[in-house]
């Protein structure tokens, strides 16, 4: 099975969970993950 189709299904399920779960905890976790990823990117760009 191609990786693109697997990632597409995972993305669709994640999108459904985003639309259903409008809780502050979910958005806080999403913000933490985005902050961590961007921080790692900035650190790797400068060092």
Image: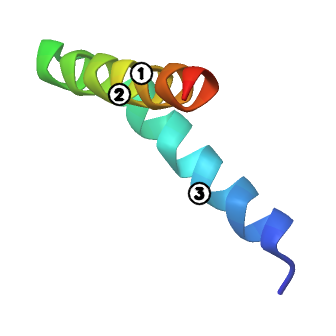
Pointer 2 local density, CA inside 10 Å: few below 14, some 14–19, many at least 20: few
Residue positioned 49% across, 43% down in the render:
14
Q: Residues within 10 Å of mark 3 (few under 14, many from 20)?
A: few
Answer few, some or many: residues within 10 Å of disc 1's Cα (few below 14, many 20 plus, some between 14 and 19): few
Give the CA distance from mark 3 to mark 1. Answer: 25 Å
Alpha-carbon span between mark 2 and mark 1: 5 Å
Q: Viewer-proximal residue, 17 or 1? A: 1
**Taking 10 as reference, is 40 above or below it?**
above
Report the quarter where the C terminus lies. Answer: top right
Q: State the quadrant of the N terminus.
A: bottom right
Q: Which residue is mark 1?
A: 39
Give the mark toward the camera: 2 or 3: 2
Where 28 sits versus 15, above or below?
A: above
Q: Determine which quarter of the picture holds residue 36.
A: top left
Classify residue 41 by image quadrant: top right
The residue lying toward the viewer, choosing from 4 and 20, is 4
Q: Is residue 23 left or right of residue 11?
A: left
Q: Which residue is mark 3?
A: 10
In the foreground, 44 or 37: 44
Nearer to me, 43 or 32: 43
The answer to whether the residue labelled 2 contacts the one labelled 1, judged by CB atoms less than 8 Å apart, is yes
Residue that label 2 marks: 36
């Amino acid at each position: 099975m191609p990786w693109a189709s697997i990632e597409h299904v995972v993305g669709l399920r994640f999108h459904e969970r985003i639309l259903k779960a409008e809780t502050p905890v979910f958005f806080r976790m999403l913000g933490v993950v985005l902050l961590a990823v961007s921080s790692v990117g900035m650190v790797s760009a400068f060092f």
